[in-house]
Image: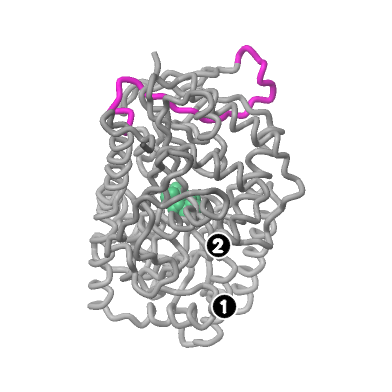
Amino acid sequence: MPSDLVIVYHRQPYEEVVKDGQTVFHENKSPNGIVPTLKSFFGNVDKGAWIAWKEAKDPANPDFQRTVEIDDSFGRYSVSRLPLTPEQISSFYHVTSKEAFWPILHSFKEKYNYDPVDWPTFREVNWAFAEAAAAEASDGAMVWVHDYNLWLVPGYLRQLRPDLRISFYHHTPFPAADMFNVLPWRREIVESLLASDIVGFHIPRYAANFVSVARSLFDVNVSKREQVAPELISDGTALVERSIPTEIEHRGRHIAVSASPVGVDVDYIGERADSRETEKKVDVIRRELGDSRLILSVSRTDYTKGGIDQLLAYERLLERRPELHGKIRLMHVSVSANRSMTAYESIQNEIEQAAGRINGRYGSFEWQPLALISTAVPFKHLVAYYRAADIAWITPLADGMNLVAKEYVASRTDLDGILVLSEFAGAAVEMSSAVITNPFSTRSMDSAIDQALAMVPAERQERMKALRSTISKYDLRAWAREQQRLFDEVRGPEKSRSAA
Ligand code: GDG
């Protein structure tokens, strides 16, 4: 049965477990994160489809289960798993997406690695995703494509199935034209994105950048421009835009450009944070800490997350303020997802070296100033650390949104805790009540952590209240509602998307 909604996302939407030789598919254990929200859209259609990839050493192996039918609490949907060889995965994902696109998207020109890119393989894999989506989609269905590693899918889909509605959502930043146009494949990528009906981003700046890139490459006109909602204007911070193009026209087609920040499930995280189980874990953490205050930093290990700069700021703090020795601890969670890749291996080594140096220089038998955690912490424990932390120190150099900052605030139903947040995280445009810092400035990093350490309870509470109010307004449900509104707008039969 064809599907009215096809989601194209590289990750599979369930946990796959082999039990007694049988493969079983479970709903993800944690309802946290974006995948359950995406699946919730299947509740609005008769049947949904999801396209992802799965490694297959031999794609021709007849035992490879290409399609999985799921009927769970989210509805009925099928999952098409594209069999990709390890070589294809390495070329399409690890090399082209992570070594060429990722640095440019996050404005790290010096990390950009062009030489090993095998463009025909990138095209081939994107074509396979497009073909799989086209095979599943009903007449006029909505196909919702996620993230930069599938940039060519909208263009291919438009060729294969001109009847489809296509929405493309970016989870990363989208840089300015002088940065994006470093990519030699820029015209092909942007032409493909312009084949969508909707191109979505987290924040207005990325949407504005996309439009300026499109205008630098093609004859694109802005047909609608709107003021940005006041809550998304964190005054004076780096990523703020006051108005953005919301519709552009290219070759007679109108394309909606949207900026809607992904949020978190504030109620779910709040309930977890208030649970008896979390309370017990918080007691254990607090006992372990004694009189020390806890500063918490959580991220994937990635040069964009600014781990090294933060550790250097912590080292300066211990050097500048000896009175804090024995009184604070930094828990630096830096989870390595891609240790096999050279870029990530070296950053992990640098982090380990800096952490070792700090503990060696300032630690004693009784006091370790820093705990470095490199393996994933289960979410229920993470919530307890959020709840126990006096300060969440989130200082990426570039970050599409940063959900950790929002999760921290969602867990603070007690209205305590301080968020120190980089102005280069997309989240900063709505979280103006955080202590905002510029991670490229040692002075700003130093004064922000000093300000946080000195903050009195009344100010902490006032700021936390304001932060909770914005993240509740822009929670995961609000994001889903906005996506649905956009889908309905482009789907409406009375509204032809072709320009007259
Ligand atoms: C990309 C964009 C954008 C982290 N450590 C552990 C753990 N986490 C979970 C957090 C959070 C998620 O991972 C990280 O999300 P972020 O948004 O902070 O960052 P990216 O992974 O880089 O995500 C980003 C996002 O897409 C959404 O569009 O915001 O800018 O880069 O949910 O809780 N979870 C567990 N243990 C850990 O140790 N269980």
Residue that mark 1 sits on? 315
The part of the image, by quadrant, that contains residue 106 is bottom right
Query: Which residue, given by chain and number where applicable, does mark 2 sit on?
Result: 372
Name the residue furthest front: 500
Looking at the image, which is closer to me, 120 or 110? 120
Disc 2: residue Cβ within 8 A of ligand 1's nearest atom: no
Which numbered disc, 1 or 2, marks the residue closer to the eye? 1
Instruction: Name the foreground residue: 192 vs 367.
Output: 192
Q: Position of residue 269 (x, y in %)?
A: 30, 50
Label 1: how many Cα within 10 Å (few below 14, some 14–19, many 20+): some
Q: Does residue 486 lie above or below 394 as drawn?
A: above
Residue 372 spot, x, y in % from top left: 55, 62
* Marks 1 and 2, the one that precedes in the sequence: 1
Cα gap from disc 1 to disc 2, whole angstroms: 14 Å
**258 relative position to 218: left or right:** left
Q: Is residue 451 magenta?
A: no
Question: Is 24 left, or right, of 380 in this rendering?
Answer: right
Looking at the rendered structure, the secondary structure element under dot 2 is strand
Q: Dividing the picture into quarters, in which one does residue 402 lie? A: bottom left
- Does residue 377 appear in the picture of this structure? no
| Quadrant that contains the N terminus | top left
Q: Amino acid at mark 2?
A: Leu
Q: Amino acid at mark 1?
A: Glu
Relative to 183, is 136 above or below? above
Q: Which residues are magenta?
A: 40-63
Which residue lies most toward the right here? 115
Tag 1 near tag 2, CB within 8 Å? no
Residue depicted at 38% across the width and 25% down the height: 141
Question: Which residue is depicted at the point 48% across and 40% down?
Answer: 251
